[in-house]
Amino acid sequence: MTGNTSTSTEATDASDRDERALDVPRVDPASVDPIRVTGLRKRYGTVMALDGVDVTVEPGTFHCLVGPNGSGKTTLLRTLLGLVEPSAGEVVVPDVRLGTAFQRPSHYDQLTVADNLEVFGALAAVDGDWAATVLDRLGLDVVRDRIAGELSGGYSRKLDLALALQKAPVYLLLDEPLGDLDDVTKLRLLDLLGDYRDAGHGVVVSTHNLGQFADRVDHLTVVYDGQVLLDARREDLDVPDDGLQEFYVERVLEAATGAEE
Amino acid sequence: MSLRTILGKELRWSRHRVVALLFVLVLLPAAFAGASVFFQHVLPKDAPVAVVAGEDVSEEEYDVVAASFRLFSKPVEYESEAAAMRDLERESVYAVVSVPPDLDDPDVERVNMTVTIDGDVTPYREPSGALVSIVARTMNRQLDTRVVVQREVRGDERKLSSYLLPTFLMIIVLTFAFAYLPYNLAREEAVLDRLRVETSLDTVIAGKLAFFTGLLAVPLLVFHGVGVALGYDVNLLAPGAVLGYGLTFLACGAIATAVTFASGFGTTGRLFNVLVLFAFLGFSGLVYPVGFFSPLRRDIIRRVPTHYAMLTVRGSTLRDIPAAEFATWLGGVALFALAMLVPLKLSMLAYERGT
């Protein structure tokens, strides 16, 4: 799963942010194909979870999939991961490393944090030094010998994020990654995700709370009732960061009102 | 008042768990009640007995002997004693009798007839004593010639405790497959999504089945050690036994895993696995000779692959018969294990599509 990516740990920049970013193995966005979703439909029995979704995720961007509960975000994310088979349409994901954190904890409950990191690290052949950096930056090293099933909700979430991040995946696909996290860790994680983006990785975040990502997002896709309500680059939206959440909510309310009429 | 509320909650809960409750309260009891028809006799009435008709034996003489056995067994005609003895070792028959010549010759006053049983099949030893008495009485009532029926025990008379050692290990293997393996899998359900991204469900399940099959080496060694310590003449490390246990676990583990996936890791799947476990325990002929309880049960047992795994294990551990002698049966159990991979794969595909 290495595909057409290239990585390097060379460091040249001096600013604080760039120093952190240098820790992240670099990806040349020009050498990585985007994730392309065309006319995607997914039906569960009589329920149409996704209905004609078109989305493109570029490497080197922070892409937010936002929508209310039950809008189809998670189904879309799971389709990108190959966990959900489309009923119709096309999903093209390049053959590169994918890292993910699900809404529900997804790790071995009966192993320690360190065991989990080792097992999944071995499956993805991760760089040990980078894995240690991730552990440190997420503040997870203090619980590395604890049984994962005994962790608090916040640490459990951190472990899942660490499992995704230690791979230095070309595309990171995260479902509600900030849930259960304390404010300090949220900030650390947002910085880390920003560093990934800056290092050329594609970051896809599914959330119903856009406000937390407003100052990071490069591309916004609003999903409502299984359809894409809005798909735009951040620079094309004439909305300030602190108004982005309200902007999205208004779009959803308009759609809901329109549907009722 | 609060009790009423709590009872109301239980009612609401039962409405949501109606499938599991129907399984536990209707299907399971019905299956157990229905299974009682397979247990009809205290003494074996339909255990197959080889009746060898030599060249100098008339059809009438064969019929007299076969008829005398029919009351408490199922006579099966053999043309050679060697073939009958071979099947005695393989528990295809539980006794061998050669029809004596001159049985209906009025000039012969006394005829000896020997019923041979295997000393290793402990549960049949005492019933065979009763069988011999009944056969002798029946024949002497029908014939003018006096017939003396003797019972001959082939090999040492094995104690029940020693006989049961390989059986108990088979019970452990079946329980491990139908109870512990699904429990272990269910504990890891949450991590399956991540594993599907990092590798594949096929690899995960193949790894789990291979690991748990390997783990069986531990109880195998423990049983062997206990057997040696207690002075039993049982070689649980015989290749035939190792293969028999291993293939049984693979087949049953595949069934249990298929049920677990097909039920979406639900309670119904766990209960169904328990039911299948009971079915294998009841219909593999683990302890008693087939035909001990009813002809229907005998016919079912003869169609259950784990029965042949048990016979192979007993032949290898109690009688030191080489594994090659059981190649056909072991091959059959291996084919059964392979066949069970089909429902396993289908249930995994359904699970992957469903999630």
Image (cartoon, rainbow, N blue to C red):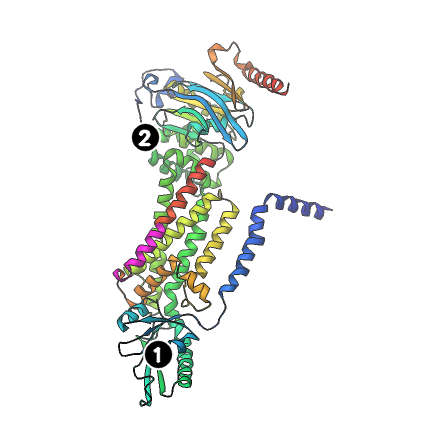
Q: Position of residue A86 (x, y in %)?
A: 45, 29
Q: Is residue A249 left or right of residue B273?
A: right
Check the image and name the residue furthest to the right.
B1
Q: How many marks?
A: 2
Chain under callout 1: B
User: Could you classify mark 1 by the number of other residues whose Cα lies within 10 Å: few (under 14), some (14-19), or many (20 or more)?
Assistant: few
Q: Amino acid at mark 2?
A: Asp
Q: Is residue B41 magenta?
A: no
Q: Nearer the viewer, residue B297 or B226?
A: B297
Q: Which residues are magenta?
A: B324-337
Q: Is most of the magenta stretch helix, strand or loop?
A: helix
Q: Is residue B133 left or right of residue A261?
A: left
Q: Nearer the viewer, residue A28 or B132?
A: B132
Q: Amino acid at mark 1?
A: Glu
Q: Secondary structure at mark 1?
A: helix
- Picture quarter containing residue B317? bottom left
Q: Residue A127 got which mark?
A: 2
Q: Is residue A95 above or below residue A233?
A: below
Residue A48: tell me if it is visible: yes
Marks 2/1 same chain: no
- Picture quarter containing residue B163? bottom left
Q: Position of residue B26 (x, y in %)?
A: 58, 53
Residue identified by numbered label 1 = B60
Chain under callout 2: A
Q: Is residue B7 left or right of residue A86?
A: right
Q: Position of residue B90 (x, y in %)?
A: 32, 66
Q: Position of residue A67 (x, y in %)?
A: 54, 23
Q: Secondary structure at mark 2?
A: loop
Q: Is residue A237 above or below residue B308?
A: above
